[in-house]
Amino acid sequence: MRAMVDHDPTRILGRRKAGTLKLRETWEALTAEILPPDTSTARDVIENLRRGDVDGMSTGFRTVSDRWGHEGDVMVRELLLVDRLDVSVVAFPAYPATMAALRSFEAYRRCSKKRCPSKAVARRRTQFVST
């Protein structure tokens, strides 16, 4: 599982296997915590989040099992089981209620301007929240 920008595999922000992406899932929300790399892609995303130009999240998935039904006159698809492929910071989320935000931007910025001790680097996490 990877964190990306706009579901683009060439714009990686983090990965669970590398320990740079942590996911927490509840019935209400999926929360992704990303330790972004020192790359132009990550710096651009952080700046766009800081300015408020980008603030959406999305998750890429493959449907394993679903069920279709009706709610009144509306056809409704219920996803029963999915294989999640990625979480992405996006400009146009499919669900407008999602949110991407910087939790520790100031700490990240202080560390990015000088060499930080390893403890400080370990704490400089950026949290992107998808609800």
Image (cartoon, helix red, strand yellow):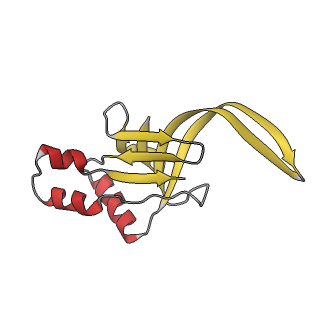
Q: Residue 105: name its quadrant.
A: bottom left
What is the x, y in percent for residue 91?
Answer: 50, 60
- Compared to 28, does 81 lie above or below? above
Is 80 located above or below residue 37 in the figure?
Answer: above
| Position in image of residue 28 (x %, y %) | 59, 48
Residue at image location 47% in from the left, 62% down from the top: 55
**Horizontal relation, residue 123 to residue 76: left or right:** left
Query: Residue at left 35%, top 30%?
Result: 17
Residue at x-position 10% and y-position 47%:
117
- Please provide percent x and percent y for residue 14: 35, 42
Please state if 108 lies on the left or on the right of 90 as rendered: left
Count of numbered badges drawn on the protein: 0
Farthest residue, direction bottom: 51
Position in image of residue 100 (x %, y %)? 45, 58
Q: Is residue 3 left or right of residue 70?
A: left
Q: Nearer the viewer, residue 130 or 25?
A: 25
| Residue appearing at x 25%, y 63% in the figure | 106
| Residue 96 picture quarter | bottom right
